[in-house]
Image: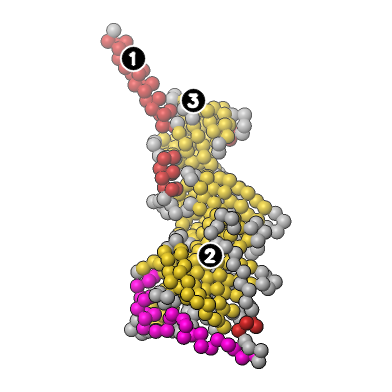
Amino acid sequence: MKKVYLLLMVFSILVEFANAQKSQIVGNWLVQKVEVDNKVEEPYMVADFMGDGKMVMMGVEVGTWDYNKKEHSVVMKSGFDKDFNGEGKILELDDRELIVLKDGAKVFYDKLDLNKIMEENKNSGLLGIWEFKNMPYQDTNSVMTFEEPDVFTFVQKEEYHETNINGTWIFDKKKRSVILIGFRSDAMLRGESEIMTINEAGFELRNKGKVYKAIKKVKPITIAESDMNIEQLAFSEEDFFTEDGDYKYYSEVEKLPWHDMHLLLDQLSGIKQLVYSYNKLNEESNTFDTEILKANVFVEKEQQRLKVDNIFYGFDRFSTPEDVDFTENDENGDNDLYPLNESMYRVLGQEELDLGLGTFACTVVEALNSNGEQLKIWLINDKPAVIAKLIKASDSYDHYYSVYELQEIINK
């Protein structure tokens, strides 16, 4: 009787151990690496070993699986693909890692904690719409959207072709990286990318030794949804001159709110950055395409040095196109409309301007630049060199309309 009892105990322990081994396999795994014939491949596939014995690869049910306790192996049955069929010897198995030897290939699985992924993705700073510049080459428009909890969409448009890819993304807070699952094997951003820099304006990723740069986009909104009215700027260069060709507005400088250089330095010395939304009208879709631009502020009061980035070209230091140099502003801040350098302008009057940041008393100015662009500018009266709003329009062959609005003042 005692011997039978001992046998039952041993049997129950073995069953419990086998069940424990099987329960460790159940779950979601990332197939991160395969070693075969001294070569290393990185499939980056999600494999789900379900508790009911079903086997799912990349969201598709491909067969069944079971645990062979005698051989300490995973037995897979599949008519979907030979790689998902057969028996694989388990070399390593714990709560984080599974290594299987099958058909001469060593397959490395990493356990996925879906709750942790959801939380880290949410706080990654990657959520939203990002536009890559000149990827893979100039005149290609590449936009990636990261959504909760773990879905990404990649749209690439060329003149006669458009590619749409949907996949899964995983942010790793500790490694400061993002894994993109769903790209074809030769795609540029496939697999794991190091996040080199990231902020509200954009990010830089390094993948397989190459750096990819993207700027933050805001979901396009229709004119009807927007609180921005299309204001026609109906003035031209002729309005600034008399019939005899004399400039009419030399004395306008006296109406501007910013004259005192010392006041300018005092007011800006505590400011680090000015954050603007850049809203460009897309006349084909009748929407505003929006992105965030940041103007750096540099002040040395004792040396009377001042520099505020002029981001009113449609890009900032981070989002400057690769074939364009970011133009440094003068360090003396003595242009009448600094940081703008337009010299042909006239003052319209005073206006209370309501923005999300607050209500500002502004001096309103109309200006023209050397490119024939029309500008309407709201200068904040008590914040020298801080522009609250700017409308820029052109009626030339590259007709466009854009609005810049102050979103945030970041102090040091």
Task: Give the mark count.
Answer: 3
* Disc 1 crowd, CA 10 A, few/some/many (<14, 14-19, 20+): few
Residue 293 appears in the rendering: no
Q: Earlier in the sequence, mark 1 or mark 3?
A: 1
Is-magenta flag for residue 258? yes
Q: Is residue 28 above or below residue 184?
A: above
Residue 278 numbered mark, or none = 2
Q: How is the image coloured?
A: secondary structure
Q: Earlier in the sequence, mark 2 or mark 3?
A: 3
Q: Marks 1 and 3: which is nearer the front?
A: 3
Residues rendered magenta in the picture: 245-272
Q: Is residue 243 left or right of residue 335?
A: right
* Disc 3 crowd, CA 10 A, few/some/many (<14, 14-19, 20+): few
Q: Which residue: 64% across, 58% down?
A: 286
Dot 1: element:
helix
Q: Which residue: 57% across, 83% down?
A: 344
**Contact (CB < 8 A) between labels 1 and 3?**
no
| Residue where numbered disc 1 is placed | 8
Residue 52 numbered mark, or none = 3
User: Looking at this rendering, what residue extends furthest in the right direction?
Assistant: 160
* Mark 2 and mark 3: Cα distance apart in space: 52 Å
Dot 2: element:
strand
Residue 115 appears at what percent x and percent y? Answer: 41, 40
Q: Marks 2 and 3: which is nearer the front?
A: 2
Q: Disc 3 residue type? A: Asp
Q: Which residue: 54% across, 83% down?
A: 343
Q: Disc 1 residue type? A: Leu
Q: Disc 2 residue type? A: Tyr
Is-magenta flag for residue 215? no
